[in-house]
Amino acid sequence: MALQDLPVVLGGYRLMITEAPAAKMREAEDGTVTPVVDRTSGEVQYVVTLFAKPLPVEGRKAGKGEEIRVNLPGDPGEGFEEGMYVELVNAVVNTYEIPDRVDPRKIASAGLWFKAAGLKPVARPVRSAA
């Protein structure tokens, strides 16, 4: 059973764009590539790749971070480029399971995927020259 649209709070992370938003593409078995379109709105979906690095916490070693891909319901607009810091608007996480082709009772792959209603620019934190 896959869990859907679980709200996620990423306030403890700094999110930097590592791949600018682009139309989400799907490759068919015949090799053709087409944009993914929302079934209800008909709008082309987008995807952005972010590096999520934990914010420093006093008394704890800083974590290394993780790259995540986030699905967006449409074009987030101009100005979202690599290296820019952002926040996710109404971020949620979903689970998925892909059954084994030989034995559908077994799970061949499982994981998480993120989606958000949009992106919001964030000013990059200024470090003191101490």
Image (cartoon, rainbow, N blue to C red):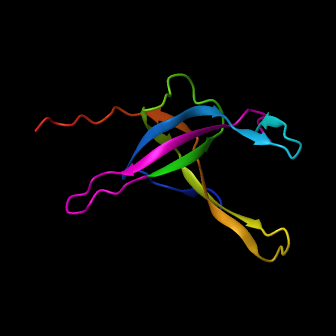
Position of 53 with respect to 25 (left or right) is left
Q: Is residue 110 left or right of residue 36?
A: left
- Residue occupying image coordinates x 62% and y 56%: 5
**Please, what is the dominant secondary structure of the magenta stretch?**
loop
Tell me the magenta residue range.
37-65
In the rendered image, the residue lying farthest to the right is 30
Residue projecting furthest to the top = 78
Q: Position of residue 58 (x, y in %)?
A: 20, 58
Q: Quadrant of the C terminus?
A: top left
Q: Picture coordinates of residue 29 (x, y %)?
A: 87, 47
- In the rendered image, residue 127 lying in the magenta stretch gets the answer no
Q: Is residue 119 left or right of residue 98?
A: left
Residue depicted at 13% across the width and 35% down the height: 129
Residue at (43% x, 43% y) in the render: 15
Asked whether residue 64 is drawn in magenta, I would say yes
* Residue in the foreground of this view, choosing between 50 and 93: 50
Residue 11 visible in rendering = no
Residue at the limit of the structure toward the left, as seen here:
130
Quarter of the figure with the N terminus: bottom right
Q: Position of residue 84 (x, y in %)?
A: 42, 32
Q: Residue at x 37, y 55 (%)?
A: 64
Q: For the image shown, how many numbered marks are present on the structure?
A: 0
Q: Is residue 26 above or below residue 57?
A: above
Residue 118 appears in the figure: yes
Determine the image quadrant of residue 34.
Answer: top right
